[in-house]
Amino acid sequence: MYLFILATLLAQTLGLTVLGAVSDINAVNNVAASTLPFPSHQLFQFGQLGTWIENVAARSNGDLLFTLLQPTPQLYILTAVQSDSPQATLLYTFPDMTGLLGITEIAPDVFVVAGGKFHGIADPIFGTFSLWQVSFADSHMPCKINCSPDNKQPSFKKLLDLPDHVYPNGLTSVPGKLGVILVADSTGSLLRVDVNSNQVDTVAAVPEMVPVPGWPFLMGINGVKIYDGYVYWTNSFAATMYRMAIDEDGFPVPTSDSSSDAGTTTNAAAAAATFTSKVEASINSTKVTVETVVFMPITFMDDFAISDDGTLWITTNPNNTVVSYNQDTGKNAVVAGDQTQEVMAGVNAAVFGRTATDSHILYVVTAGGLNSPVNGTFVEPAKVMAIDTSNAAADGF
């Protein structure tokens, strides 16, 4: 696995074609160039350099919540998102942290946020991370923004510390299991956390989650989402997305000895996969099947969104693009941004709107090129953008 990754990265550097890779993500598989990029517009941008928005979540009422990784560990709300004048408001500055990471909804209008301390960009301090609850459903704080009986000021509380984990990053909620989430530890494992009981289990640690050797940042598994019985994740510097079957409780489904599904690979290193004793007893196996969903000849895969039909919408951060990939047809293209343009500078997370009028809008957040300036020089404040995907179905996405 590592040799394949290193070979493909070398091929990318030398401009070679890689077997099985997406060879031209700007316009491939008969996607009409006239339809790309999809229309997009800016909703909000900070006024100062050095800002990095890390992740974003959509509320059922149409608001957006976004986390700040730099310069401070803050949570913002963006209201009036579909108007001509969206309003960003600081909700909370988290104590004893330097930056926030993932966010996910664990119950109606109740969210979990991960955060911790960093020495610098993507350089986490071991044992400093924790999970916090942000609840709009059961609030006891005085209202400060857009006050009405239906729009309360959220409450905040620490749920639990994660002293044994290095880099809890992407978060996703297990469908139908209130308070149960999967957490990507970017050093190479997947955690299952039940915030109802504060139970934390390492449910998978496979080679496809481990950081690629030789890169400056400790960044393996990053974005994580659940769709149709699978957990999907990106391995960032491998520029590859993988998936693994999970059960209704969020535990990996073990590979049966007779399994020989086409297109899947049972890890040769399965015996080295690590699980807690609770999980070993629960799944009665350390063997899992990891499928490669898509590899792309780019520098980095960050977070992503999955639309209702299973289409993947992948943010690429230093590549300054959003890439769409249809799992059924293999159609793929850059739908927003360009390597040499600032419109999507450092785009790193995405979510679809949840109301009847914006379910086709893909909201993305950026780091402003802070870790990789556009064309080597351009950096801007972090921002929130909206991409209109109305033409996606017609284009085969």
Image: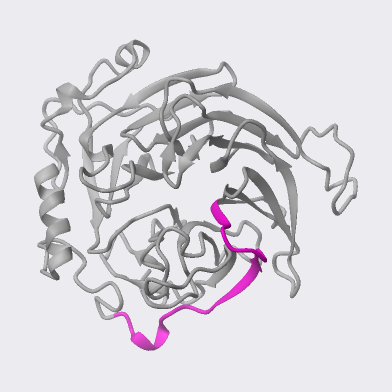
| Res 374 → quadrant | bottom left
Q: Is residue 128 above or below residue 312?
A: above
Quarter in which the N terminus is drawn: top left
Residue at 41%, 68% in the rendered image: 320
The picture places residue 308, in percent across and down from the top left corner, at: 47, 56
Where the C terminus falls, by quadrant?
A: bottom left
Residue drawn where x is 39% and y is 53% of the image: 302
In the rendered image, residue 144, in percent from the top left (x then y), is placed at 87, 47
Q: Which residue reaches farthest bottom?
A: 34
**In the rendered view, does 221 fall on the left or right side of 144?**
left
**For residue 128, above or below residue 212:** above
Q: Which of 361 and 310 lies nearest the eye of the viewer?
A: 361
Question: Is 113 displayed left or right of 217 in the figure?
Answer: right
Q: Nearer the viewer, residue 60 or 363?
A: 363
- Image: magenta residue range: 31-54
Magenta segment includes 45: yes
* 329 horizontally vs 190: left or right: left
Residues 274 and 186: in front is 186
Counting from the top left corner in percent of width and height, residue 377 is at 42, 72
**Is residue 184 at least partly visible in the picture?**
yes
Q: Determine the residue positioned at 37% across, 71% down.
A: 376
The count of marks equals 0
> What residue sits 10% from the left and 62% below the top?
19
In the picture provided, is 255 more to the left or to the right than 185? left
Percent position of residue 354, x then y: 62, 56
